[in-house]
Amino acid sequence: MELPPKVKNILLLDSEGKRVAVKYYSDDWPTNTAKEVFEKAVFTKTQKTSARTEVEVTELENNIIVYKFAQDLHFFVTGGNEENELILASVLQGLFDAVTLLLRGNVDKREALDNLDLIFLCFDEIIDGGIVLETEATVIAGKVGIESTDAPLSEQTISQALATARDLTRSLLK
């Protein structure tokens, strides 16, 4: 019997290697210090690459890491060295595309921090206990609650209402 693909963690770091949003599904890093050391090692190993258009793959400490960068955010998905890189890459691409949809194409650190609740909901819709549930970005974004940006303000979450107000303000100031 073949086991389903498992993800060990999802990391969203800024351009300096600091945490924006992370979620661990494995006990490979039992303490917060061990997690931070791993994150620093991943960032250091990948910071010189140019993974802006395509998903890149590397190996670190017997783990396969797929990653992609967008402006000042670095997206990482880690799996064991026995995992299929293509499955990990589809998880990463699904996460990246869902976050892009949720942040309305403005994928940067400030916008990510403003919508951190939606990003963590994305993590939860994609992975449950390390097992991959969904990789289709539109399905993920729809489950998180942003299917249409034209929903009435009374039916939007606080984050969505603030984003709508911010967009209206920007359009008025132009």
Image: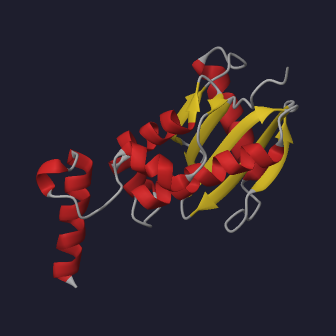
x%, y% of residue 2? 84, 24
Q: Is residue 102 above or below residue 113?
A: below
x%, y% of residue 40? 68, 38
Looking at the image, which is closer to me, 48 or 132? 132
Quadrant showing the C terminus? bottom left
Residue farthest along the left direction in this orientation: 154
Q: Is residue 19 left or right of residue 90?
A: left
The residue that appears at 75% across and 28% down in the rendered structure is 4
Q: Is residue 91 above or below residue 56?
A: above
Q: Is residue 89 left or right of residue 84?
A: left
Looking at the image, which is closer to me, 2 or 49? 2
Quadrant showing the N terminus? top right
x%, y% of residue 26? 67, 20
Q: How is the image coloured?
A: secondary structure
Whether residue 93 appears in this view of the structure is yes
Quarter of the rendering containing residue 69: bottom right
Whether residue 44 appears in this view of the structure is no
Q: Is residue 29 left or right of residue 106?
A: right
Residue farthest along the front direction in this orientation: 1
The residue that appears at 75% across and 51% down in the rendered structure is 46
Q: Is residue 135 left or right of residue 63?
A: left
The residue that appears at 33% across and 50% down in the rendered structure is 114
x%, y% of residue 66? 74, 47
The residue that appears at 20% across and 46% down in the rendered structure is 158
Q: Is residue 173 above or below residue 67?
A: below
How many numbered circles are shown?
Answer: 0
